[in-house]
Amino acid sequence: MEHHEHHQMWGGRFEEELAPDAFAYSHSLPVDIRLWKQDIETSLVHVRMLGIKGIISTHEANTLISALLEIHDEIANGRWMPSAETEDIHTAIEQRLYEKVGALAGKLHTGRSRNDLVATDLRLWLREMALKLANHLYWLCETLMEIAEEHTETLLPGLTHQQHAQPVSLGHHMMAHCWAFLRDMERLYQATQRMNLCPLGSGALAGTSFPIDRELTANELGFHMPTPNSMDAVSDRDFVAEFLFVGAMMMLHLSRLAQELILWSTPEYGFVELADSYTTGSSMMPQKKNPDIAELIRGRSALAIGNLTGMLALLKALPLTYNRDLQDDKTLLFQTVDILLPSVRLMSAMLETAEWNTARMREALQGDFSTATDLADYLVRKGMPFREAHHLVGQIVRACIQQGIGLEAVDLEFLRKFSPLFDPDVLEVLSPEASMRARTSYGGTAPESVRAQIEMARAALQVLEQRLSDLHTPV
């Protein structure tokens, strides 16, 4: 049997093939076939470097490069796909290379191992996915900011403990979510920055005796620099675990927003109606409009959290350097990426097409005593200590409840029974509109404060997008 007909990239030392059930258990092609582009890209750069350094001849390098480009076109156009029996995508591409150029294909693997090859491919793939995810996040943040700009004066109850607390604007509420996603984008940038080192040339674990140029391959693949330690390079999956953390946090933020959309679309709230395109009906109850996409986003956050904990468990007891356990990092990573991209995209689409019932939001503030803090603040401005004012307003609220009225219904005579500090101007602070407009502090809910934070967020978003794009651009 000729070398190129082997299913494995190893075998000279073995007299028997791997048992069929052992092969089925261990072969990774169905998962790592996603890395085919990156594998060819890495091989092209490696071969070019081998030729430049004289490790193989210029003619040999050119022949291998032409064949690798042909394989790229074959896979891209569906003219050739690896056989299902092949161990992994790296073996599949090398076998196809043998079919094209014969024994010369064996020189492709000079000065490298599958260990540094896989680590490089995975970093390249994930860097590309991070940029795609950043673009989706960009549009989600833009969507939230557009809603915020439109609704700087739309009132609704702000909650703590899921109880009415103080009036806020819908714009302020949407920006609270926007800042969380901006932090996700910043974490994505930082994680990509740490990921952007090139393991190629680390060999199996100890480097190589060939005069390779790791700076050249790192630069050509768009990495910041080569990994400084060959043992760390082939065994490090921090970048996968870190991305899975970033992804889990992102899904957590999406889930919190999804939960609000789910609650707000119930008849009890009635604050929002989600578009038909992102809701479903009931198989039994014809009147139902279910927020299924929001619920699925909420549910899939659990899968992303599980993948993170799975990855941490996978790594926790591995001695240096490479161990086959690391094969399963891709299963966890690919699943999270497959969850993240559509979740972010669908959340943007749901928000863009949502109809906000602003009248219902305003009605929800009626009689909820959410301007009680404004009443206490009024007394403080008149010289009363806040704790005393807090206690006195609590008594006023209790009296209102006993009489079945809200704070917006009280008059000066009623308030004067509790304190002579109340003057006619007190009635101006009791409306939710006045409460919202009064909160002009940095980061507050007043329209001018919300407009200021939208400007700040938009500037931060542009900077982050540019930084992520720069990281992805080869030097």
Image (cartoon, rainbow, N blue to C red):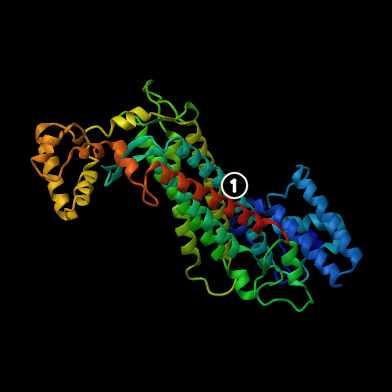
Q: Is residue 289 above or below residue 350?
A: above
Front residue of this view, candidates 71 and 393: 393
Residue at 26% of width from left, 47% of height from top?
161
Instruction: Name the residue carrying label 1.
Output: 135
The answer to whether residue 147 of the structure is visible from this angle is yes
Quadrant containing the C terminus in the rendered view: bottom right
Front residue of this view, candidates 246 and 109: 246
Residue at 59% of width from left, 70% of height from top?
235
In this view, the residue farthest toward the right is 59
Residue 411 image point, x, y percent: 15, 33
Q: Quadrant of residue 427?
A: top left
In this image, 359 relative to 211: left or right? left
The answer to whether residue 303 of the structure is visible from this angle is no
Residue 181 image point, x, y percent: 48, 49
Residue 400 image point, x, y percent: 13, 36
Front residue of this view, candidates 44 and 94: 44
Residue at 46% of width from left, 31% of height from top?
354
Query: Is disc 1 placed on a helix, strand or loop?
Result: helix
Quadrant containing the N terminus in the rendered view: bottom right
Circle 1: residue type: Asn
